[in-house]
Amino acid sequence: MSEDRKATEDRRRFLKIVGGSAVIVPMIGLTACSGGKDEAPAAAAPKAEPAPAMDKPKAMESAPTEAAAPESSSSMPKISEDNPQAKSLSYVHDATTIDASQQPRYKAGQECANCALFQAKADEEWAGCSIFPGKAVNARGWCSVYAPKPA
């Protein structure tokens, strides 16, 4: 117990001696390594006035929102099983070809058509998926992100 008290007293004595420079000196050192720009540290810079509120940029006006309907599957390119994201999520076009020993998350009967993330209209064979934006996935496909549609 006395060793803990001595350590605490030593830390307090050190902080009294060093003061605020224990915090400021490392920050100055880090700004010196920030890419060679000769600028004052952020703490010393004058505060800028807040920018006035602006209208939404044109690019954002045309961007689809979450509430927007998914693209038609006929206009979307079909995802390739060789796509890096598809590979990382073990996507396949035909769930019946999955080796259950290699994919323990897979259960018989799971496929994109009955996944909550599949964005098909009616009985489309290929449709969008929220995991692969802008790409169409096969209704008979499967990936490791499979989530059953709510009952």
Image: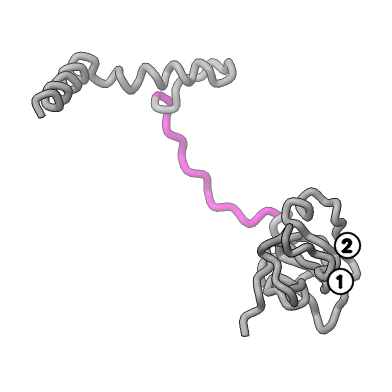
Q: CA distance from mark 2 to mark 1?
A: 8 Å
Residue 125 lies in the magenta stretch: no
* Residue 57 coordinates in the image, percent (x, y): 68, 53
**Residue 72 in the image: x percent, y percent?**
85, 72
Residue found farthest to the front: 101
Residue lying at 73% horizontally and 57% vertically, measured from the top left: 102
Colouring: one colour
How crowded is the residue under tag 2: few (<14 C-alpha within 10 Å), some, or many (20+)?
some
Secondary structure under the numbered disc 1 in the rendered image: strand
Depth order, front residue of 59/126: 126
Disc assigned to residue 47: none
The answer to whether one can see residue 137 in this image is yes
Farthest residue toward the left? Answer: 2
Answer with the quarter of the image where residue 79 lies.
Answer: bottom right
Q: Which residue is mark 2?
A: 78
| Image coordinates for residue 113, horizontal then vertical, percent | 77, 76
- Earlier in the chain: of badge 2 and badge 1, it is 2
Q: Is residue 16 above or below residue 121?
A: above
Instruction: Identify the element where label 2 is drawn.
Output: loop
Relative to 110, residue 134 above or below: above
Query: What type is the residue that disc 1 sits on?
Result: Trp
Residue segment shown in magenta: 44-57
**Residue 68 in view in this figure:** no
Q: Which mark is residue 126?
A: 1
- Residues at circles 2 and 1 in contact by the CB criterion of under 8 Å: yes
Q: Main secondary structure of the magenta part?
A: loop
Name which residue type carries label 2: Lys
